[in-house]
Amino acid sequence: MPDDPRIAAIVDHLRARGLGGPFACAIVTGTGLGALVERLTDACSVPYREIPGFPAPRVSGHGGTLHAGGLGGRRVLVFEGRAHAYETGDAAAMRVPLSIAEALGAHALLLTNAAGSLRPEAGPGSLVALTDHINLSGFNPLVGEAGDGRFVPMVGAYDADLRSLLHVAARACGVVLHEGVYAWFSGPSFETPAEIGMAGRLGADLVGMSTVPETILARFLGLPVAAVSVVTNLAAGIGGGDPHHSETKAVAARAATDLARLAEAFVTLLPEPRA
Ligand code: HPA
């Protein structure tokens, strides 16, 4: 949407409020993962409700504020809270925010989420870098898009170079970082053990209700993507896993500090963006 006048108007508005780019990275924080925001220096913040076209996140644990500030010596844009497809049925709910990130001059996108793990060795509190995804939702955020740009290539959607930097960052800050494939279920109900059994046979290591539509949108917009899941629970039926939202929020809040340290170390490794 680079030529979309609505996007241009929002970009002008945000620049006037001190949220101009360029940014080494835009970061989307998942459920209970807003701890990163406390690490920002000289932050300018605007609630989503004051930005035309921005979603109003409705899930408890999601802040709904856009921040621009310093992190690890770089300038970053942080989306504290996201809209999910399960809130309204709109898989493109994050299209305006991500278009804004691109139009404001973000050079990369770091997506974070809370997820269930199918791997007992990567249990609650673990951090996992996504290598790929499986879209089991039946939704796609580019449905209705005109033009050949909608046929977005998805090989290498999770950028290998950015993932290498995530691993370097993890070593630098003493955080264990696993790798895995993320399966997107639409939610909002959690999965059944039979569904998790299916996802495991299909090659999934993690399950969650977000991130995949944002990765598709980001690739459509030309933004390279890195993504990290915080494991909040074992997936339904795995080692007795029986996920509940209160559990996912509580574990996410505890693991958020590790994620924030990882994100800061990662951002430090990114090149200084040119305007
Ligand atoms: N399933 C789907 N989404 C999730 C889970 C889960 O087990 N945990 C955190 N988000």
Image: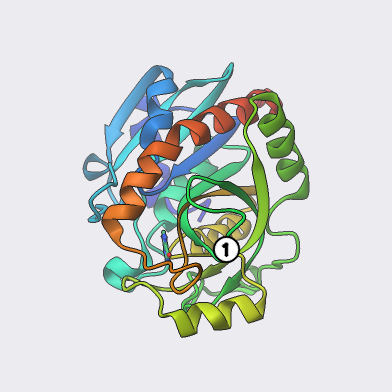
Quarter of the image where one finds residue 16: top left
Q: Secondary structure at mark 1?
A: helix
Quarter of the image where one finds residue 192: bottom left
- What residue is drawn where x is 22% and y is 56%? 58
Most foreground residue, 204 or 108: 204
- What residue is drawn where x is 43% and y is 21%? 40
Compared to residue 250, the image places residue 175 above or below, namely above
Residue 13 in the image: state x and y as whole percent: 33, 34
Q: Is residue 110 visible to the viewer in this orientation of the structure? A: yes
Residue 133 in the image: state x and y as whole percent: 62, 66
Most foreground residue, 68 or 193: 193
- What residue is drawn where x is 69% and y is 59%? 157
- What residue is drawn where x is 75% and y is 59%? 156
Compared to residue 45, the image places residue 205 above or below, namely below
Residue 9 lies left or right of residue 162; in this view the side is left
Amino acid residing under circle 1: Ile
* Image mark count: 1
Q: Residues within 10 Å of mark 1 (few under 14, many from 20)?
A: many
Most foreground residue, 54 or 78: 78
- Image quadrant of ligand 1 equals bottom left
Residue 46 lies left or right of residue 142; in this view the side is left
Compared to residue 201, the image places residue 79 above or below, namely above
The quadrant of the picture occupied by the C terminus is top right
Residue 250 in the image: state x and y as whole percent: 32, 45
Residue designated by label 1: 216
